[in-house]
Amino acid sequence: MEVYQDPVLREDRQMLLFAHLSQLLNLFTGFGGFIVPLIIWLTQKDKIEHMDAQGKQILNFQLTMLIAAIVAVPLMLILIGFVILALVGLLTLIFPIINAIKANNGEPTHYPLSIEFFK
C-alpha cells in the first residue's frame, strides 16, 4: 500500500531574491519584469517555500504599476500624469530591492499599493 506524501518544500532564499530582483528588468529592457517573475513563480511555486505567496505579491505589484502607468499617460495632458509616472518609476525601483533583501534574510515581504489580482 502506497501512502501519498506531499513533497517537502525546500528553502531557497536566493531564488526568492532573484524573483524579486527580476522585476528590475523593466527598467533595463522595457519588458521582462513581469514575464521572468511569472515564469519563476509558475515553475517553482510547488518546489520552494514561500514562492507561491511572494510570486503572487510580485505579479500583483507589477500589474498594479502597469495600470498606474497606463492611467498616468492621458493624465500628462493636465501635468499630474508626470508626477504619477515618476512615482511609479520610483516605486518599481525601490520596493523590489527592499523585498529582495527581506526575502534573502527570511523576513516577510509586502508590496504596498498593490491590487490583489492573484490571491
Image: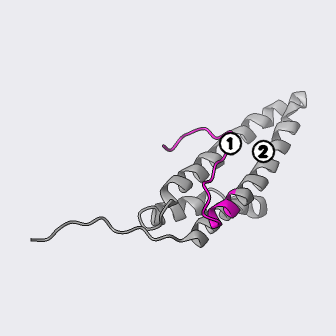
Q: Is 11 on the left-hand or right-hand side of 109?
A: left
**Which amino acid type corresponds to the residue marked 1 in the rendered image?**
Pro
List the residue tagged with mark 2.
88
* Label located before the other in sequence (1 or 2): 2
Q: Which residue is found at the position 25% from the left and 66% from the top? A: 5
Q: Nearer the viewer, residue 23 or 30?
A: 23
| Total numbered badges shown on the rendered structure | 2
Q: Could you tell whether 75 is left or right of 60 in the image?
A: right
| Numbered disc 1: secondary structure | loop
Q: Quadrant of the N terminus?
A: bottom left
- The disc placed on residue 112 is 1
Tell me if residue 96 can be seen: yes
Percent position (x, y) of residue 16? 59, 65
Residue drawn at (46%, 66%) of the image? 43
Name the residue furthest right: 79
The image's colour scheme reads one colour
Circle 1 or circle 2, nearest the eye: 1
Amino acid at pointer 2: Val
Question: Any magenta on residue 35?
Answer: no
Query: Residue at coordinates 56% horizontally, 55% vertically from top-left?
Result: 54
> Residue 35, position in %: x, y?
59, 59
Separation (CA) of disc 1 from disc 2: 12 Å
**Quarter assignment of residue 102:** bottom right
Q: Is residue 16 left or right of residue 73?
A: left
| Magenta stretch, main secondary structure class | loop
Residue drawn at x 78%, y 54% is 94
- The residue stretch that appears in magenta: 99-119
Within 10 Å of disc 2 (Cα), the crowding (few <14, some 14-19, many 20+) is some
The 10 Å Cα crowd at callout 1, few under 14, some 14 to 19, many 20 or more, is few
Q: Is residue 43 above or below residue 87?
A: below
Is 108 magenta? The answer is yes
